[in-house]
Image: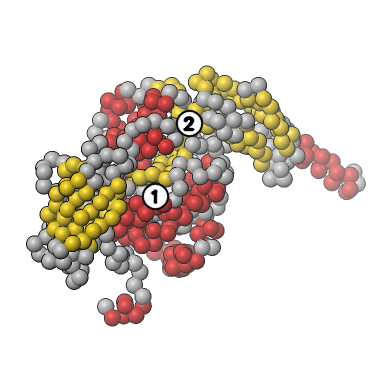
Amino acid sequence: MKLPRLVLVLGLACALGSALRAELKLPAIVGDHMVLQQKQANPIWGWDTPGTKVTVSFGGKTQSTTAGRDGKWTVKLPAVPASATPQTITIAGTSRREIGDVLVGEVWMCSGQSNMGFKLNQDWNGDIEAAASNLPNLRLISVPQLGTQELQNDFRGEWKASNAQTARNFSAVGFLYGRWIHQIVGVPVGLIDNSWGGSAAEAWIRRTTIDGDPRFKTLMANTAKREADLQSEKGKADFERSVATWKEAAAKAKAAKKTAPRAPQNWLTGNARPGNIFAGVVHPTLGYGIRGVIWYQGESNAGRAYEHAELFPFLIEQWRKEWGQGDFPFYWVQLADFMAEKPAPGDSAWAELRETQTKTLKVPNTGQAVIIDLGEGKDIHPKNKHDVAARLVRWALVKDYGMTFPYRSPEFKSIALAGNKATITLDCFGSTLRPFDVNELRGFALCGADKVWHWGTGKVVAPDKIEVWSDEVAAPVAVRYAWADNPVCNLFSNDGLPVTPFRTDDFDMTTKPKTAAVAAKE
């Protein structure tokens, strides 16, 4: 056989082998028991041999496209109303696939760190909540944690109907939030849990976008330095030594029947490196039809609250751009009370982080659940997730589903100073104010021009007004409420929603980075 002919035969054999091996492939997010978002066009995508015509049929309508050079194909299913009747999506390319038991309803993404990942069976009432979770039209899927700089296109996971077994291991806040929507609105609901404990906000954003924004120049300069250090020969050796030390300690603990120490974390593949979670966890679901996002994160950024003031709105803005589905709802849980109660009023990084969360309400179509009364001083993971989810879902029921419920905690509106007293006006959003548990108002502090804070005495003087004073402050210039890591505070709306922590001053945040000159003086 002549060489050219041999090459031709081998080429044909390879092509034939590839054709025989060619198979229509779908991502995990597109599978049996999935829920499509009602009343909007829903992208369906997958991979096939480049150039292959792919036809997708659903609800009596058919969409066709051609797989691109990389094999990727995408179609958009026409918008349809909610339906609890199981349907089938048929996809035909080099092979044929049928996606069965597909429902149409409301789809919500459940994101954040460990308090979103906190499982239903860890809630105080998780055992009975799980026992009451046999809801076949409530569907759940979880995205595994993978930290990487390489954009991932898929993950291992599958949609499952809610029952005692699947619900107990799902996000408590996510499940309870979704269950209320399912039962109150009366439509199927799909929930996507992609939370990751201990994660930093910057890890949830595409690396190239955060790299390109000058506001985060310092953050990314520090990131680049850390990457270089950890990828150096010394960095690699140091990590290998830490792993070896951990293995030895773990073996000793196991032999002594004690709790083993936590394994050392590789920051390069972890949950804090900018872009890591976006690439490994968010990107595989990017574009899937959703109603919106619920978010429970901030603890890991509390020490950098000043930076978070720009970072958090940027995250929301970028996610909306990435999804290409408009300004979908984005609702979050404000940080709870945590750590020791301090006897004197003063500064707090956690209070500053809460303030950045509240200020992010200026971003359209957002909402905040205030839980300053639901935390546990000794545990960063409060176990009462029922009330957390209830306050969060009120936003959706009112803003997205047109219902009438109290939904927004009172927020600071204005201050009037006269003599030794300050009168605070709050926006109560249709409600009125009341102290909880005792008549005495707790949680207020005042300062004069010296900026030294003193506890204040207060009383409700009108449905939306509070009068505050301190015998130690003759001429107050500013007032703070619930301004501490773990504040003692008791002002609520008559609807049972706690007043949002606030300050009336604009003093420099303690988390604001110091200039080189200031740092040198200290």
Does residue 214 sit above or below 336 in this rendering? below
Closer-to-camera residue (499/304): 499
Q: Is residue 250 left or right of residue 471?
A: right
Looking at the rendered image, the quarter that the C terminus falls into is: bottom left
Q: Residue at x 31, y 80 (%)?
A: 520
Kind of residue at disc 2: Glu
Kind of residue at disc 1: Leu
Residue 497: image quadrant is: top left
Looking at the rendered image, the quarter that the N terminus falls into is: top right
- Crowd around label 1: few <14 · some 14–19 · many ≥20 (10 Å): some
Location of residue 142 in the rendering, given as x and y in whole percent from the top left corner: 44, 37
For residue 106, which numbered disc appears in the image? Answer: 2
Q: Secondary structure at mark 2?
A: strand
Mark before the other along the chain sequence, 1 or 2? 2
Foreground: disc 1 or disc 2: 1
**Could you tell me how many numbered marks the image carries?**
2
Q: Secondary structure at mark 1?
A: helix
Q: CA distance from mark 1 to mark 2?
A: 23 Å
Q: Residue at x 36, y 31 (%)?
A: 404
Location of residue 10 in the rendering, given as x and y in whole percent from the top left corner: 81, 42
Q: Is residue 169 left or right of residue 486?
A: right
Location of residue 121 in the rendering, given as x and y in whole percent from the top left corner: 30, 32
Q: Is residue 204 visible?
A: no
For residue 361, which numbered disc appears in the image? Answer: 1
Does residue 221 sit above or below 467 in this rendering? below
Q: Is residue 318 visible?
A: yes
